Image (cartoon, rainbow, N blue to C red):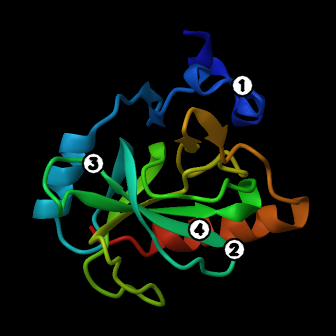
Amino acid sequence: MLALFLAPAAWAGKSASSVVCMANGQALAINNDKVLQWKASTPNQYHDRGHVSGPVMRVFDDRPGHTHFEIQIGKSPNDVLEVVYNTEFGQLPDIQVGMQVEACGDYITATAKAGPYPPSPSGAIIHWVHTNPSGRGHDSGFLIIDGVLYGQENPPADHRRHFDEQQANFFNSEQP
């Protein structure tokens, strides 16, 4: 129960078992089935909170400052989700097929281009799988790979303003 009250910065160095995925102030259990339901039934850019778990199935080319890979969250070959990780929140290990991943963050249905962002090859993403440096707008997330916690380092102070602006732009452009 103590993990519910830890500030994101306090997560750094904690064991993976001590973190809790939060959604609007409530603990969120792994919701693979719900995420698959959203992926199958919601319009492009639908946004919600996801907490998923599964093995790495494919590793995509990195984009500047981000690591992209796909995890299997259901039984069907199409039951996949792209994980987008911002490396300013700490480096990841060399991602390999078969690694076990748990990701807590913002889910988005990504079947078509949205602004500068291309559609996901997986049809959906989970991102902001890291601490929220501003502490405003949405809950912090995390990434656990093979039992090790990632995404809890804070970016340099000059980058925090950038994240605040990015977050404001995202939430101001959301579709109803």
Seen in the picture, residue 114 relative to 175 is either above or below; the reply is below
Mark sitting on residue 73: 3
Label 2 and label 1: CA atoms lie apart by: 24 Å
Label 4 and label 3: CA atoms lie apart by: 19 Å
Classify residue 112 as left or right of residue 27.
left
As helix, strand or loop, the secondary structure at mark 4 comes to strand
Give the residue type at disc 1: Lys
Q: How many marks?
A: 4
Q: Nearer the viewer, residue 93 or 36?
A: 93
Query: Where is residue 149 drawn, in percent x and y?
Result: 64, 37
Query: Where is residue 159 drawn, in percent x and y?
Result: 81, 67
Label 4 and label 2: CA atoms lie apart by: 7 Å
Which numbered mark, 3 or 2, is in the foreground of this view?
3
- Residue at left 27%, top 59%? 80
Label 4 and label 1: CA atoms lie apart by: 23 Å
The residue wearing badge 4 is: 67
Q: Nearer the viewer, residue 4 or 137?
A: 4
The residue wearing badge 2 is: 65
Q: Sequence-wise, which precedes: disc 2 or disc 1?
A: 1
Which numbered mark, 1 or 3, is in the foreground of this view?
3
Mark 4 closeness class: few <14, some 14–19, many ≥20 residues within 10 Å: some
- Residue at left 17%, top 63%? 78
Label 3 and label 2: CA atoms lie apart by: 25 Å
Q: Nearer the viewer, residue 145 or 6?
A: 145
Return the residue found at the far top. Answer: 1
Classify residue 54 as left or right of residue 32.
right
- Residue at left 55%, top 51%? 129
Q: Quadrant of the N terminus?
A: top right
Label 1 and label 3: CA atoms lie apart by: 25 Å
Q: Sequence-wise, which precedes: disc 4 or disc 3?
A: 4
- Image quadrant where residue 85 sits: bottom right
Query: Where is residue 100 drawn, in percent x and y?
Result: 45, 42
